[in-house]
Image (cartoon, grey):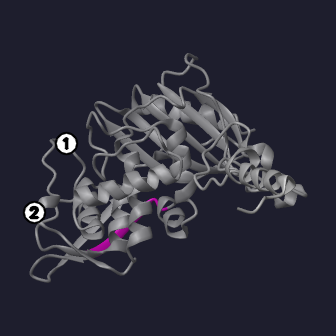
Amino acid sequence: MKCINKSLIISLVLIFSIGFTGCGKLEYDLKYNAQSCALFSYASDEEKADTFASNLCVTDNGLSEDEYSAKAMGLFDLNNKETIYAKNVHERLYPASITKIMTAIVALKYGSLDQILTASERIYISESGAQVINLKPGDTMTLSQALHILLIYSANDVANLIAENIGGSIDGFVDIMNDEAYKLGATNTHFKNPHGLSDDEHYTTVYDLYLIFNEAVKYDVICEIIHMNNYNTTYHNAMGEPVEFECRTTNLFLRDDYDNKSPSGVTVIGGKTGTTNAAGHCLLLLSKDDSGAPYISVILCDSQRETLYSEMSELLEKIN
């Protein structure tokens, strides 16, 4: 048996020690720890990755009580990424037909404007007093027509028509709505239907609606539709016969017969209304100031329609 040099043995021990212990340990499962960020540095601000909220208004829940009767309110400056006013903006509430903004986003992302939608018996709305155009099985219209009726007239059966045709089923479409809302950061939102009729598990917040609407206004077609005060079109029944339809916007800020206009220096571009017994009176708006700078304002759960619009006017006054 040959003798082994002691220095060689020591060297081998050190090599194996480094290989299997301490800083030299082989580790492929890189778990997060509080010091992880200290391992990385950047040469300049330009090279830093943007955070999720870098282009968004950020706020706490805001006031819990104030002089307004609305349960929750928010006013957001899109250019300066500032929250001008906040009241209960993270409180979960029913959104009523403001839900249809999310419906429109999903429809445009996964459908095409010239796509033909066909009504089935499953789109029928049975709730008494719900806004509908009384679609019958076999009725057809394009997605473009459906979006106009959805956002201007707020027809609930048209919301189901869009959902079933774009999502394969109403439930499948609602799953996509929830997925897309989550991607936008609307983590306090959960949809159970595409129209907003009341359900205990159908809720959102003022802040989440800001996030959703901030995405919606990136679509030119949505901005165009929400600015219209009336709409006329012709769709077809199951026999191929034309069915005439015309409507006026549910948004009183856009109607000539409404006395309580937006404050001086502010122009309402458009938005979405929502009203149910459970949700109260709700309103979501895109507005601009005299320089053209955009703002989103949201009111949920106001006591009555007249109060809703007067309080929204007061909220918009804060822009100036």
x, y percentage for residue 312? Answer: 55, 35
Residue type indicated by callout 1: Gly
Q: Secondary structure at mark 1?
A: loop
Q: Position of residue 105 (x, y in %)?
A: 44, 61
Q: Residue at x 35, y 33 (%)?
A: 279
Taking 188 as reference, is 174 above or below it? Answer: below
Residue under the point 28% across and 46% down: 192
Task: Look at mark 1 in the image and give the residue it sits on.
Answer: 129
**Residue type indicated by callout 2:** Glu
Mark 2 vs mark 1: which is more N-terminal? 2
Does residue 253 appear left or right of residue 83 in this picture? left
What residue is pinned by disc 2?
121
Residue 197 lies, with reference to residue 304, above or below; the image says: below
Q: What is the magenta range? A: 228-234
Q: Which quadrant, please, contains the C terminus? A: top right
Q: Is residue 215 magenta?
A: no
